[in-house]
Amino acid sequence: MRATLQDGSYPRPMLCREHWISLDGTWEFGYDDDDEGVAARWFDQSASGPFTRQIRVPYPPESPASLIGDRQIHPVVWYRRRIPRESLPNGRDGHRVLIHFGAVDFRAQVWFDGQLICRHVGGQTPFTADVTQAMAAGTDEYVLVVRAEDHPDDLEQPRGKRALRLLEQPRFRSAFDLLMLRAQLGLAPAEIAAWWTQLQAVAPEQRPALLDTLTKPRGPASLAGESAVDAGVAAPERSAPRRRRRRRYRGPA
């Protein structure tokens, strides 16, 4: 589509390129729970077995809008898109063919016609793959493959800005929930790691009750239901708030 015919679908309308296509839409998709895809060369153009489902990009597989809506944890997923040859300029007239990714969470690898083009780390930042040199002549279509890896139990992995009210609804699902809990309670990383070990050792249906136990207040106020004053701890005295003296503006002297 030419920039002069921009219909509002280009993600950066003020920087629209003259020739571009959108890769949003239906992609082939597959889970890789055993992390065997690289060794099995799922990125080859002839690989067909692992891509048994379809997903609507840019929606994540957990979203119903993606046509999958699977909220289980799958650390490694693969995407594949076949692109007709006539859709790309094939690097003619000195032009380069770039594929822009708005975000791939968290580690990404990109193959084009079986060649590894780029790697990227960081689910909050965009990146670009230059596929000009990988475009083979005489083919009817190109094959773009993306491997995305995201481990929710990695406590050192950066996360997005999301708020979870775990104290009101303690539904433990992943280490990310514990990270949010750490932010709410001000806990040390070592203590969060110990909680993670305890929660992983029990059945999923028992985790909310265990999390309730771990998050109960500790100290004199929680002993036998006694209040802080009854346990011999003096309550802090509160001083009356000081009234601020209002100054009147008298104007220049």
Image: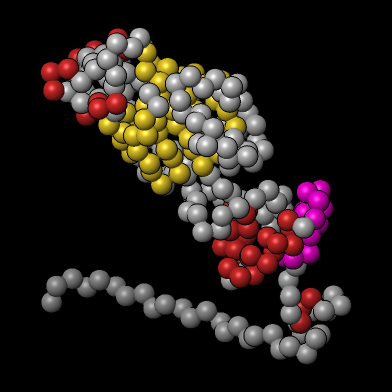
- Residue visible at 78% across and 90% down? 232
- Residue visible at 35% across and 9% down? 140
Q: Is residue 228 above or below residue 213?
A: below
The answer to whether one can see residue 98 in this image is no
Q: Is residue 80 above or below residue 164?
A: above
In the rendered image, the quadrant that contains the C terminus is bottom left
Q: Seen in the image, is 206 located left or right of residue 238?
A: right
- Residue visible at 70% across and 62% down? 197
Q: Is residue 65 above or below residue 123?
A: above
Nearest to the observer: residue 142 or residue 41: 41
Which residues are the magenta region?
202-215
Q: Position of residue 189 (x, y in %)?
A: 58, 68
Instruction: Tell me, yes or no, whether the highlighted magenta stretch contains residue 90.
Output: no
Q: Position of residue 103 (x, y in %)?
A: 41, 38
Q: Is residue 12 above or below residue 125?
A: above
Q: Quadrant of residue 237?
A: bottom right
Nearest to the observer: residue 190 or residue 232: 190
Q: Position of residue 108 (x, y in %)?
A: 43, 40
